[in-house]
Image (cartoon, grey):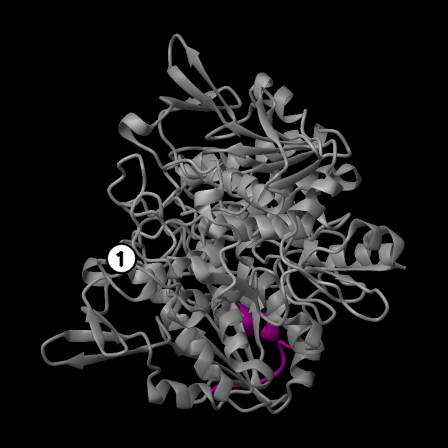
Amino acid sequence: MASLLLLVLSSIAASAWVAAGQCNWYTGSWVHDESYPLYDSASCPFIRKEFDCQRYGRPDKEYLKYRWQPTGCELPRFNGVDLMQRLRGKKITFVGDSLTLDQYNSFLCLLHSAAPQTAFKSTNDGIVFEEYDITVAYYLSHYLVDISNEQGYGRVMHLDRINTQAYNAWCTADVLIVNTWHWWPSTGSRQEWDYFETNGKYIKEMDRTQAFSQAFFTWAYSMQNVTAATKVFFQGISPAHYKGAEWGENGRTCAGETKPSTPSEFFGVPVQQEDVVKADLNQVRNVMGDKWKPIYLLDTSYMSQLRKDAHPSRYSGIRSGNDCSHWCLAGVPDAWNQIFRVFSTIMVSLLLLVVLSSMAASARVAAGQCNWYTGSWVYDESYPLYDSASCPFIRKEFDCQRYGRPDKEYLKYRWQPTGCELPRSVSIRQVFDHFMLININRVVIVYNDCMHASRFNGVDLMQRLRGKKIMFVGDSLTLDQYNSFLCLLHSAAPRTAFKSTSDGIVFEEYDITVAYYLSHYLVDISNEQEYGRVMHLDRINTQDYTTWRTADVLIFNTWHWWPSTGSRQSWDYFETNGKYVKEMDRTEAFSQALFTWAYSMQNVTAAAKVFFQGISPAHYKGAEWGENGRTCAGETKPSTPSEFFGVPVQQEDVVKADLNQVRNVMGDKWKPIYLLDTSYMSQLRKDAHPSRYNGIGFRNDCSHWCLAGIPDAWNQILYAALLQKNPPLGY
């Protein structure tokens, strides 16, 4: 029974798409289908000239012949008559910028092609299809929040305020499809504001994704007050195709492209702002609790990323140069509307935001359980878990108390997941002698009808792993976690003798070995006569791999060194598939390397457990916690979730996407790699870095962590995962 439940729940976590008998509409590929397109653009009276590629000279037509095919299921063909019958007497409003206009035009064409004889008229409310009394409207709003003119500041974008007139117009709709982002990066004459304003503070400039996040939260929160019957959707962020490196052709754009990318040919990273949307929607849900009104995400970014071939480029009626942002019609927005049509007809509660996307969601809520990675830091006088002065393993770069940090309050915070406790230890005999119910983000031990819990139990862990070897592989942040892990074990059994060997630290009584292996990038770097130091994004160093295979538990991490330049950069060229590149986007390079590493892990011994430790954030940008110009220096308390304005760590989502890609490639032969998705919980700890209180002379280290500290919480979650035969995937 437990194994069956585990199988079901693991499937939920892995696909992030829950429904009986349904699969994830957003994972799949574009397949050639001669029955496409869904309509003839020449017969649709609604297509604006910027989207009408055939009319304005595009010579090829193959791009029209592709249908989105989800993995393992079919996306129902669009049925416009059925949709209009279901929504008779209703009003559908599309709200956003020109990309929303693209989708709005597509929607009108799909309805018109389904019932070409049905009369329609243009009114102040929108386009009315008279036979069905359905109104379809478009409302222009580049940013969703209010912009006003103020003396002394000029044009001010209010990140915490919705324009009243706009809000009232939106509230007249029965169905709202909303989108924004396209205009947020604008500068110069395209920038429509002079200052940002939030909570009475005026700021000339700020990170655009952070500004977008604050505005999006404001909009999502405002949607909690629309009528209960109104259905609210957010249309996924639409990607552009100006970077040929995303499909393996540096220097190219969408111009001249005639075929989609296959999933294996696409090397781009997940759209960061899509993950911002998910984080903000989940935050609104947490704030509202039982009063939450669902906002449904149409998570179409990835499927659109594969369509480098489907943009107007120069074939539009407004001659805007090379348009790789908007979409030809017929085209990709038709697939978005196919997915919207399915939502609008079934509207089941299982389609809630928290389980919509396998690419960015981290092991979410299921069957009443909670998420280890969503929560807050709470003050706890019983902390820290050990005295740093009594731990012989802490290196001087992490030993903040020894090197003069005057405050101690940062040591007193415990990570508290929302709605549950972090899983704690039970005796090993209880685990094997009594029924164990494994749930998606938590282990519950049922024993005489009560739950047994205790603090982190290093003795219990060493008993479980007797005779085993645990290896931490990565850079100095991994070393930070490794030191924490040793301290946790030592504090649990301080009289247990240990020795340092070539294999690692051995706790002799339990015959457990804990090792650290330095690897900044996980992939191979070699010296070549013509190119110098070459990082091979598609190759693992044989010696490294052979060493890793000696471990029973592996915890990997990388990213910290990838942005390096100048003397800190350890390579001169990137190489992949025989091609040498002097420079490339570092996140794209990281993604290719991580896929190589993850694929190589499929060949380690079946018994070995492999974990990837979540990307560790730095705190050099005070805007993330509402204090522009500050860093971690002098910070003494964590941020609360409501005080944190940063965006999700983009590279964490790259990790999830790559791990899912390896899983799809391997199919039934897949060996799980478990993600410890700790980025968000760490983002809240601006107070827990060494800053200048370290023994190696760093003036302001806001990257590493003091010990005791945050890595102890990472290791608590690692311990919780090791309690389980099959831990939650985390992606």
For the residue pair 416 and 163, the one nearer the viewer reads as 416
Query: Number of labelled discs?
Result: 1
Residue shown at 49%/28% (left/top)?
A: 519
Say whether residue 35 is visible.
Answer: no
Q: Is 236 positioned to the left or the right of 634 in the image? A: right
Q: Residues within 10 Å of mark 1 (few under 14, many from 20)?
A: some
Q: Is residue 577 above or below residue 307?
A: above
Q: Is 196 positioned to the left or the right of 133 in the image? A: left
Q: Which residues are magenta?
A: 106-122
The verdict on residue 558 being magenta is no
Please name the residue that numbered disc 1 is placed on. Answer: 634
Residue 573 percent coordinates (x, y): 39, 22
For the residue pair 105 and 679, the one nearer the viewer reads as 679
Q: Residue furthest top?
A: 529
Residue shown at 62%/35% (left/top)?
A: 598
Q: Is 559 positioned to the left or the right of 697 in the image? A: right
Say whether residue 450 is visible.
Answer: yes
Q: Quadrant of the N terminus?
A: bottom right
For the residue pair 229 and 136, the one nearer the viewer reads as 229
Q: Secondary structure at mark 1?
A: loop
Q: Is residue 208 above or below residue 724?
A: below
The verdict on residue 118 being magenta is yes
Instruction: Give the quadrant of residue 11.
Output: bottom right
Q: Amino acid at mark 1?
A: Gly
Residue 629 percent coordinates (x, y): 21, 58
Residue shown at 42%/35% (left/top)?
A: 395
Residue 164 percent coordinates (x, y): 34, 89
Residue 588 percent coordinates (x, y): 46, 39
